[in-house]
Amino acid sequence: MPHVIPANVTSPLRTSVTPELAGWQYLSFRVHALAEGQRYRGESLGCEVALVFLSGDAEVKVNGQAWSLTGRRDVFAGLPYATYVPPDHSYQVTAKSGLELAVGMAPAKGILAPRLITPDEVKVEIRGGHNVTRQISHILDPGDAEKLLCVEVYTPSGNWSSYPPHQHDVHNPPEEVELEEVYHYRFQPQDGWAMQRLYTDDRSLNEVVLAKHGDTVLIRRGYHPVVTAPGYDCYYLNFLAGEMPTWEAKDDPQLAWVRGSWEGQEDRLRLPLTGTGR
C-alpha cells in the first residue's frame, strides 16, 4: 500500500483515505473543493466528524444549528474555523466563496455536543528551537473529541518538524498510545516539497517519501520526522485517531537528547569558524 496519496486536482473530492485503503481501524480523511454556491452534505452515522475549513467562507448546519463563518484566504493566512459533529447527526456545508474543506472521521459513541470551533479558540504553541522551530495550532486536543485529535503545523523554510522523531505504535501508556495518523501537506510557494522519513527501531520500515503540495502521507507505524526544503514554508494538517487519543508518544531513543539542546549549547556549530581551534 502506498505511503503517499497525491491530490486529485481534477475532482471536487481531492483526497480520500478510508480505513480499508490505509489498512487501519479508525481514521477516515477527505479533502473537498467546492465552488461558490455548492453544498456538501453528510450523515455522521456511527462516527464523529471534524470539519476543518482550509480556505473560504461557508455556512454550516448541523441538525438544527447553523453557523456562518468568514474563513481565511488560505492555510498560511490565519487560524482555522472547524466544526465538531457527533455521531448520528446530519450536516451540510454551503460554500459562500471558493472553499476547501478537510474532513476527519472516526467511530464514536456520541457523548459530546455539536460545536463550532473559532480561530480565537485555537490554541497556538511554538515548539522546539533553532532549525526545529515550528508552530502547532491545536484544533482538537484530548477530551475535545472521543477518538479524534487534530492540529495544524507550520514549519518555516528549511526547518525540521515532528522532531525528535516520535512514534505512537503500541498501547503502552504513559510512554505511548496506538494512534493512526495522516499528514496533509501544503507549501508556500506551491511548488515546494518536504521529505518525511518513516522508520522503525528494527528498520523493518526505513523509507523516505517526498511530500508535495496537496499530498497526504499515511503514518501506519514508526517514527516520522519531516524536513522542508529551504525557500518553502510547509503546512500540514494532522488528524489522528485511536481508542485512547492522547499526545503521549515515544521519542527515538537515539535522538531524544535533542530536546535538551533547543537553546544552543557551547558545542553547537557556529559560523564562521576562525582560528586554529586549539
Image: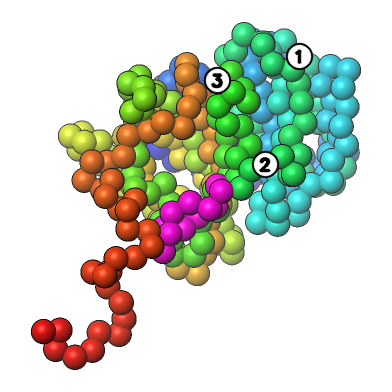
| Of pointers 2 and 3, the one earlier in the residue sequence | 2
Up/down of 247 relative to 77, above or below:
above
Closest to the camera, between mark 2 and mark 1, is 2
- Tell me the kind of residue under disc 3: Lys
Q: Nearer the viewer, residue 115 or 230?
A: 115
Q: Residue at x 71, y 26 (%)?
A: 84
Q: Quadrant of residue 142?
A: top right
Pointer 2 or 1: first along the chain:
1
Task: Judge from the rendering whether residue 55 lies leftward or rightward of residue 196; answer left or right.
Answer: right
Q: Is residue 8 visible?
A: no
Q: Are the residues flagged by discs 3 and 1 in contact, CB closer than 8 Å?
A: no
The residue under label 2 is 122
Please name the residue shown 41% across and 34% down the image.
Answer: 219
Q: Which residue is mark 1?
A: 89
Number of numbered markers:
3
Q: Is residue 72 above or below residue 67?
A: below
Give the residue displayed 88% in from the left and 17% down from the top.
64
Q: For the magenta stretch, what is the residue range? A: 125-136
User: Which corner quadrant holds the N terminus?
Assistant: top left
